[in-house]
Amino acid sequence: MEKMKGCVFCEAKLNKGEAIFETENFFVNIGVGLVAPGHMMLIPKRHYDCCADIPRDLRPEFDGAAKLIFGKIKKVFGAPFLVEYGVFGQSVSHAHLHFIPKERRGTAHYPAYEIRDVFEEIKIPNDIAPHPASWETAAAMKKRHGGYVFLKDKDRAVLFERFEQELSYRRFFNHQLTLKDIPARWQDITEEQKKIDAIKKEITKSRFKF
């Protein structure tokens, strides 16, 4: 597997061994700055800038893993929405697809939230046109514009050919839902947020089992 030195997803010592599931070519990582228990990422073991760069012969494995992870999260934590910032908006330049539960139960450490339809609630600017998502369209956008944004909720999956701050899931949770336990950037996580993050991770690890 080709890896890039210094990449947080290529080197286990950098991602702190938070992988909780893997296939031959992909793994699921918990990461830092979780939105809710059950928030995780599907990541290729080989280094690709974004999911559109994943070779055609590996796409069925990726799709199968994504379907499996989606079903497990839905059963244990509630249905997630999916988002990938294909080069645009990525804080780690290694392909990764987020699965973010659309609801979480409140605890003494963080409040509850519920999202009915992320496309309606995230308030996407009207001048950013959505395109039906496909591997081919994502690759074409990457070639033509240098990147894309992928967003899926329920049966609707679309691609946007540019990134605006309104498409940031962290901004959505921070500014629109005003949830202060979620860092605006995972790199800027506070000590208090780290404590809450540890609780979310422990819940995820204890409940997400195969």
Image (cartoon, grey):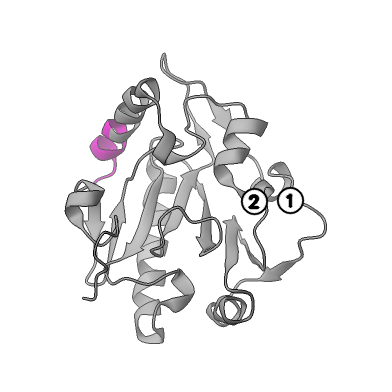
188 in the magenta segment: no
Callout 1 crowding tier (Cα within 10 Å): few <14, some 14–19, many ≥20: some
Q: CA distance from mark 1 to mark 2?
A: 6 Å
Residue 80 falls left or right of residue 131: left
Q: Mark 1: which amino acid? A: Ile
Nearer to the camera, 101 or 10:
10
Where is mark 2, residue-wise?
A: 167
Tell me the magenta residue range.
Answer: 202-209
Callout count = 2
**Residue 1 falls in image quadrant:** bottom left
Callout 2 crowding tier (Cα within 10 Å): few <14, some 14–19, many ≥20: many
x 32%, y 46%: residue: 30
x 37%, y 72%: residue: 48
> The residue tagged with tag 2: helix, strand or loop?
helix
Looking at the image, tell me whether mark 1 or mark 2 is earlier in sequence order: 1
Where is mark 1, residue-wise?
A: 124
> The residue tagged with tag 1: helix, strand or loop?
loop
Q: Find residue 23 and report its horizontal and vertical position in percent.
A: 24, 67
**Residue 198 falls in image quadrant:** top left
Q: Quick check: 186 above or below 94?
A: above
x 61%, y 61%: residue: 155
Q: Main secondary structure of the magenta part?
A: helix
Asked if marks 1 and 2 touch (Cβ < 8 Å), the reply is yes
Residue 114 falls left or right of residue 63: right
Residue 115 falls left or right of residue 64: right
Residue 48 visible somewhere in the drawing: yes
Q: Mark 2: which amino acid? A: Leu
**Residue 116 falls in image quadrant:** top right
